[in-house]
């Protein structure tokens, strides 16, 4: 696999851990009240000012490390977009695969946009960012799940479809403001996280293929060397 494909796979692999760690660490910096994954939205972590936020679900928001969260949003978006750009040809999947990847790329760009424009700085652009992630990203997963059989993207079919269904269901319930036992904030995470989780899985899958390929080539060289050594005495004996 060319270097740029390996680099793209690495970008994908790093995106989800970075985003998850930022969610945990920045959330832990909240005090009075503490951050709640069930009540608070992901975007609350990036709000730059303190105060009561959101007329539909009023809650007090104050994120001391909002800068760190917004940087994490942007970096996660960059990693996802870079991963798609660098692995585009290698992860062929026919028309469905290409359309799916295009939609997921927009979803990744949405995460970056969300960090560049926090909800309390530019609510309209932040809403656009959220729609890119939650709607385009999850629809992209569903579409990519129907990648043409025999293509690299098709090998990820069931994981792709599973995460797409999960993310789409989470999106519908989140927009309907239904927490279903995990809170509306928790449901938003069900809608937001599938894209980066898929990218991490896909990146690891691609990198594992590189190591398997290297192992196979090394095994073949060893076999060739042993075969040559075994053939020499036989030829000598015939002489």
Image: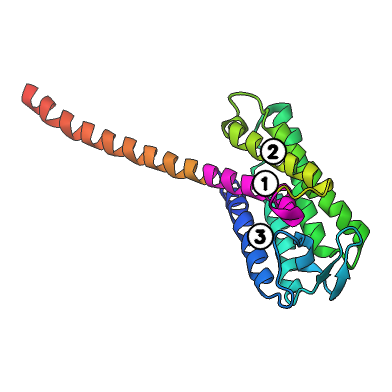
- Label located before the other in sequence (1 or 3): 3
Examine the image and state in which quarter residue 48 appears. bottom right
User: Which structural element holds mark 3?
Assistant: helix
- Residue 212, how many percent across, how many down? 42, 40
Determine the residue positioned at 67% across, 32% down: 145
Examine the image and state in which quarter residue 228 appears. top left
Residue labelled with disc 2: 164
- Residue 83, how many percent across, how many down? 66, 49
Q: Nearer the viewer, residue 194 or 2?
A: 194
The circle drawn on residue 227 is none
Query: What's the magenta region?
Result: 181-206
User: Which structural element holds mark 1?
Assistant: helix
Residue labelled with disc 1: 194
Q: In which quarter of the image is the C terminus?
A: top left
- Label located before the other in sequence (2 or 1): 2
The answer to whether residue 90 of the structure is visible from this angle is no
Determine the residue positioned at 67% across, 46% down: 194
- Residue 172, how many percent across, how many down? 80, 42
User: Which structural element holds mark 2?
Assistant: helix
Q: Nearer the viewer, residue 78 or 181?
A: 181
- Residue 65, how many percent across, how many down? 72, 75
Magenta highlight: main SS: helix
The residues bearing labels 2 and 3 have C-alpha atoms spaced at a distance of: 19 Å
In the current view of this chain or complex, which residue is farthest to the front? 181
Discs 2, 1 touching: Cβ within 8 Å = yes
Q: Is residue 39 above or below residue 205?
A: below
The answer to whether residue 107 of the structure is visible from this angle is yes
Label 2 CA crowd tier, 10 Å (few <14, some 14–19, many 20+): many
């Amino acid at each position: 696999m060319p270097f740029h494909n390996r680099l793209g796979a690495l970008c994908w692999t790093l995106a989800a851990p970075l985003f998850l760690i930022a969610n945990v660490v920045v959330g832990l910096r909240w005090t009075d009240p503490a951050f709640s994954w069930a009540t608070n939205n992901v975007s609350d972590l990036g709000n730059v000012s303190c105060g009561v936020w959101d007329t539909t679900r009023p809650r007090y928001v104050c994120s001391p490390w909002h800068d760190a969260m917004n940087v994490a949003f942007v970096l996660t978006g960059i990693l996802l977009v870079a991963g798609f750009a660098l692995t585009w040809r290698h992860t062929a999947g026919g028309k469905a695969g290409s359309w799916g990847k295009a939609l997921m790329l927009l979803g990744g760009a949405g995460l970056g946009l969300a960090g560049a424009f926090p909800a309390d700085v530019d609510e309209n652009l932040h809403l656009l960012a959220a729609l890119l992630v939650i709607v385009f990203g999850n629809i992209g997963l569903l579409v990519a799940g129907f990648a043409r059989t025999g293509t690299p993207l098709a090998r990820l079919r069931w994981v792709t479809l599973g995460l797409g269904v999960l993310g789409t269901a989470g999106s519908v319930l989140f927009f309907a403001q239904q927490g279903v036992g995990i809170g509306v904030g928790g449901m938003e995470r069900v809608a937001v996280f599938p894209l980066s989780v898929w990218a991490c899985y896909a990146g690891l899958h691609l990198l594992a293929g590189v190591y398997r390929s290297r192992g196979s080539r090394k095994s073949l060289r060893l076999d060739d060397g042993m075969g040559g050594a075994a053939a020499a005495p036989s030829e000598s004996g015939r002489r």
